Amino acid sequence: MFFITCSFFAALDVLGGGELYENNMDMKETTPVSPQFETYLIPDKNFMINTGSYLLIQAGIMIYFFGLVFINKIATFRPHSERARGIGMWAFKPNWGLQMLISTKKLYLESYFDIVLCAFLNALALIESTSPEDFSEFFTGRDNLINQFFAAIGLFLTFTFPPYVYWIIRSKFSRLADKEVREVHGIFYEGIKVDTMNNAQYNTYFMLRRLVTVSVLIFMPSLPFFQCQFLMIFSTINLVYIISCRPMIDPASNKIEIFNEFCVVICTHLVNVLLNAAVPVDFREEIGWVLIIVAVFNIGSNLCLTILSSI
């Protein structure tokens, strides 16, 4: 239940992008990685379908900024019109290109887990091709080419974006608090302490953990014990890191992160017991109920905190 709910919110398709691509694009049919993935609302491996609304939101960002530039240019043809000057001043953005780039990077940072998952699923579909003819079908037709084009970009950014963020923070560490640096690169450490390198690199660690987690989930679907052990080890390391470093500026945010990570650690230990065939069935059923209670309590607590913070 915990992982189903997390997957649901991670793949929340607010604009119906996945359904839009599926109904209007003729892409090669693929199968889910496993029945569990189909349960988690990931029924195939096509990149665009699994990205949901991400590409639509990205297109909206670009249309918004290019639209402002276009409106501003049109307004300059009527310099003597007071209304045209007002519209032109409203649409004028002195650094529109930089603002569009910052918005794009922020959206990608927030969607990193989803994009990595989608890119790896698409790569897995190519790897699992049964013959050269089957492989070539992924590149046959306009829609398949468009899908593979965006998948290639997503896969490229999967491996280059974390080192890029690491390099930006490391190279500008002494000036991270400066206004000029914060305006351009502040999205990489927004709400994060910059007093130490470990704190400033919080989002880099976050992305690397997501990258390795998705790798294990996608390429080792038949090894649940190893998946559980990996998640338990990395969750414990992250819990120790958050408790010792307290990387968030807001003390409440640190407490929420500690609470969430502590719940994940508990869940991984419980799942580890469930995977042990030597444990009696009755005891495993009780452990399962405890797992559900912990997961529901964690999700409910976070929903309540989100609602209270928005009031």
Image: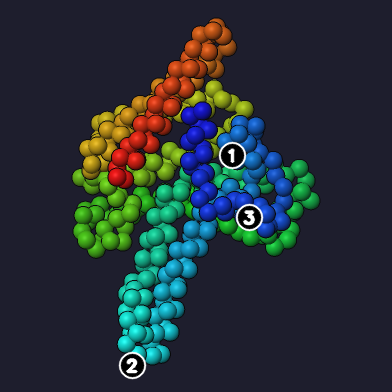
**What is the number of the mark on residue 80?**
2
**Mark-to-mark CA distance, 3 and 2:** 46 Å
User: Camera-side residue: 23 or 139?
Assistant: 23
Which kind of residue does numbered mark 2 sit on? His
Q: Is residue 114 left or right of residue 134?
A: left
Judging from the image, what secondary structure is the residue with disc 3 in?
helix
Which image quadrant is residue 219 in?
top right
Q: Is residue 90 above or below residue 265?
A: below
Q: Position of residue 169 (x, y in %)?
A: 31, 52
Q: Residue 11: horizontal and vertical position, in percent?
A: 52, 44
Q: Identify the residue position indicated by label 1 in the image.
A: 41
Residue at 37%, 71% (x, y): give it. Answer: 96
Dot 2 falls on a residue whose secondary structure is loop
Q: Earlier in the sequence, mark 3 or mark 2?
A: 3
Check disc 3 and report the residue beneath it: 21
Q: Who is closer to the viewer here, 160 or 289? A: 289
First-in-chain label (2 vs 1): 1
Q: Judging from the image, what secondary structure is the residue with disc 1 in?
A: loop
